[in-house]
Amino acid sequence: MGLYNNLMNNGGLDVYSAASASYFLIKDNAFQKCNLSDDSGTTTHSYNAFINSSTSNFTNNSSSISVTNYTWQTGALGNYYQATNSTFINAGSRYATNAGLYHYTTLTNQTKEASTMVDIGYHYIALVNGLPADTDGDGVADYLEDANGNGTVDSAETDWQSATDLGLRVTITRPRSGSNL
C-alpha cells in the first residue's frame, strides 16, 4: 500500500505498527506545516517535500527536500500549482508514466508531466483553453482515452493522439451480407 503524490497542508500524520502490519510506502508527497511521525517500522518514506513541517523520522534520507518557505501559485483548477523553477519538479521517485500522471500537471502553464520524472506533490489535469487536454480533437479528453495514464495505448483504450481510433471494433465476415442462412 502507498501514499503517493499528495499535498497535506496544516495537518498531521502518525503511522503506527499493528500486529498484522504490512509494508507501506509514503513517497512523492508535499507536507506543509504538518506534524509527522512514523512508529510503524514497516514504512518506507522518501522523495517527499517538507515545508515548515515538524517531523520525527520522516526526513531520514537524502532523497527528501526540506524548505522553510514555499509559495504556491493559483491556477485554473486550484491554489496549489508550483512555479516552473520549483525544487519539487522532476524530484519524485518514479517516472510520471509509472505513476499514471502522464496527462497531469503541477504547473500553471499546463505543461503535462509526460515521460519526465514525477513532480513531488499534488497534480491537476492538464488543460488547454480551460478544458482538459484533447490532443486529437475527438471530443474525449486525453486522460480519459489513456485511462491508466501511462502515455501509451493499451488494451481497452483509444489513442489520445489519433482522432480516427474509435476503439474496439467488431467486423463480421461470415455469413456474408445478403447470403441465406
Image (cartoon, rainbow, N blue to C red):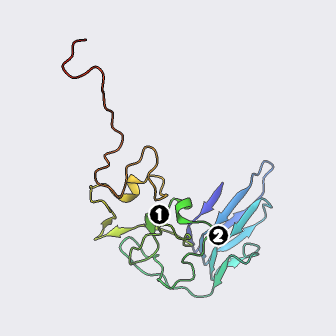
Q: Is residue 168 above or below residue 159?
A: above
In the image: residue 70, left or right of residue 159: right
Secondary structure type for disc 2: strand
Local packing at callout 2 (Cα closer than 10 Å; few below 14, some 14-19, many 20+) is: some
Q: Is residue 139 above or below residue 12?
A: above
Secondary structure type for disc 1: loop
Compare residues 168 and 118 and report the one nearer the observer: 168
In the image: residue 175, left or right of residue 98: left
Q: Quadrant of residue 23?
A: bottom right
Q: Is residue 30 above or below residue 168?
A: below
User: Residue at 64% across / 73% down in the picture?
Assistant: 48
x and y percentages locating residue 15 in the rendered image:
72, 62
x and y percentages locating residue 138 in the rendered image:
27, 55
Q: Nearer the viewer, mark 1 or mark 2?
A: 1
x and y percentages locating residue 123 in the rendered image:
48, 68
Compare residues 1 and 142 and report the one nearer the observer: 142
Check disc 2 and report the residue beneath it. 12
Q: Amino acid at mark 2?
A: Gly
Q: Amino acid at mark 1?
A: Tyr
In the image: residue 139, left or right of residue 25: left
User: Quarter of the image containing the N terminus?
Assistant: bottom right
Compare residues 126 and 50 and report the one nearer the observer: 126
Check disc 1 and report the residue beneath it. 102
User: Residue at 22% across / 12% down in the picture?
Assistant: 180
User: Quarter of the image containing the C terminus?
Assistant: top left
